[in-house]
Image (tube, helix red, strand yellow):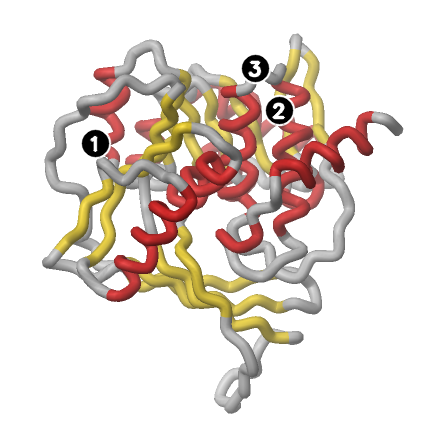
């Protein structure tokens, strides 16, 4: 079973602080956390870490950050056959302020607008395809050559490419921001009617299964004709960077393992929640055994 993850790869530098910095002040940071990042990139990393045959397609620069990212992929077992190294543009980098007192993060991303994959032949057959809205041309080619693959879209923000890809995938797993922007419905987590209204608008736009992630509340979807919020678990959060990516990676893993939708979403919620207990996106991917143990604990109650 082969899984292709297509999209952005970045290098993350996280600065943990116990409060958000005040403008025009000097702030001393004792530690910084560095690792690879990017939505589809983190998914590919999780899938390889959890023992699946994972590929990543995207672009890094021919520089220090790019070499670190490539080494991370190879060390964990991500297949880099479709990873391209650019001599024209630097590796995308993200600078993250992690407010450890409440677990929030603020991300500043430096990305050259022209960096993208050059044309590449798709030589492999894939069973699952995870997209994050970047590298649309290559993504569409992979989809065309793998018509029977299960396709999952990580729809984090509303971009033209993301909206168009959402029309051809089997699962649109979207943030509440994407859901609000597309549906024009303001979501209130305490008012399920607003979530249902946004969901219905998305169903009018897209043919696939719709899942709306609701951060610490869990996620929302329709199962067997019933609207459901699949709850998350309560944890003490220090850094939410990458939690959505890790949720998506766990969701692809769950589908690949044959979980039904409800189990897959609960499993993914737990994985994402456990990740916010650790600083650093890729570094916060929990061990599979820890997720299974927590999942079994939750369903036994």
Which mark, residue 258? 3
Residue 142 placement: quadrant: top left
Residue 203, x across and y down, in percent: 50, 19
Query: On the rendered image, what quadrant is the C terminus found in?
Result: top right
Rendered view: 103 above or below 3:
below
Image position of 58 with respect to 224: above or below: below
Query: Quick one: label 2 or label 3, which is nearer the N terminus?
Result: 3
The picture places residue 262, in percent across and down from the top left corner, at 67, 20
Q: Cα distance, mark 2 to mark 1? A: 28 Å
Mark in the foreground, 2 or 3: 3
Pointers 2 and 1 in contact (C-beta within 8 Å): no
Q: Image height check: is 228 above or below 84?
A: above
Compare marks 1 and 3 and give the one earlier in the sequence: 1
Taking the view exactly as shown, the residue that stands out farthest to the right is 301
Which of disc 1 and disc 2 is earlier in sequence?
1
User: Visible in this render: residue 160?
Assistant: no
Question: What secondary structure is marked by label 2?
Answer: helix
- Which residue is disc 2 drawn over? 264
Alpha-carbon neighbours of circle 3 within 10 Å: few (<14), some, or many (≥20)? few
Q: Is mark 1 on a helix, strand or loop?
A: helix
Measured in 3D between alpha carbons, the distance from the residue under mark 2 to the one under mark 3, in whole angstroms, is 9 Å
- In the picture of the structure, the residue carrying the numbered disc 1 is 138
Image-based side of 174 in relation to 219, left or right = left
Residue 282 x %, y %:
49, 52
The vertical placement of 284 against 64, above or below, is: above
Q: Quadrant of residue 69?
A: bottom left
Q: Do the residues labelled 1 and 3 touch (CB within 8 Å)?
A: no
Residue 284 location (% of width, % of height): 57, 52
Using a 10 Å C-alpha cutoff, classify the residue at mark 2 as few (fewer than 14 neighbours), some (14 to 19) or many (20 or more): some
Which mark is nearer the camera, 1 or 3?
3
What's the residue at 52%, 69% (across, down)?
97
* Category of crowding for the residue at label 1, using alpha-carbon neighbours closer than 10 angstroms: few (below 14), some (14–19), many (at least 20): many
């Amino acid at each position: 079973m082969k899984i292709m993850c297509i999209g952005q790869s970045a290098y993350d530098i996280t600065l943990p602080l116990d409060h958000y910095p005040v403008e025009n002040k000097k702030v001393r940071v004792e530690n910084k956390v560095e690792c690879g990042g990017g939505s589809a990139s983190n998914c590919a990393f999780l899938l390889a870490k959890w023992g699946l045959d994972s590929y990543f397609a995207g672009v890094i620069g021919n520089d220090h950050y790019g070499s670190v990212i490539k080494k991370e992929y190879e060390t964990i077992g991500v297949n880099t056959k479709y990873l391209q190294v650019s001599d024209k543009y630097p590796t995308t980098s993200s600078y993250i302020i992690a407010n450890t007192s409440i677990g929030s993060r603020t991300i500043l991303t430096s990305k050259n607008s022209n960096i993208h994959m050059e044309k590449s032949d798709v030589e492999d057959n894939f069973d699952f395809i995870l997209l994050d809205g970047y590298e649309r041309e290559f993504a569409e080619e992979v989809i065309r050559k793998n018509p029977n693959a299960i396709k999952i879209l990580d729809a984090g923000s509303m971009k033209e490419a993301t909206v168009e890809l959402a029309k051809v995938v089997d699962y649109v797993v979207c943030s509440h921001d994407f859901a609000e922007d597309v549906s024009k419905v303001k979501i209130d987590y305490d008012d399920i009617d607003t979530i249902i209204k946004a969901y219905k608008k998305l169903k009018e736009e897209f043919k696939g299964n719709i899942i709306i992630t609701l951060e610490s509340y869990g996620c929302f979807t329709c199962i067997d004709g019933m609207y459901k919020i699949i709850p998350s678990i309560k944890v003490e959060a220090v850094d939410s960077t990458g939690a959505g990516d890790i949720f998506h990676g766990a969701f692809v893993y769950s589908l690949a393992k044959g979980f039904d939708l409800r189990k897959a979403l609960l499993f993914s919620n737990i994985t994402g929640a456990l990740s916010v207990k650790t600083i650093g996106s890729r570094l916060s991917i929990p061990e599979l055994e820890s997720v299974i143990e927590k999942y079994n604990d939750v369903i036994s109650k």
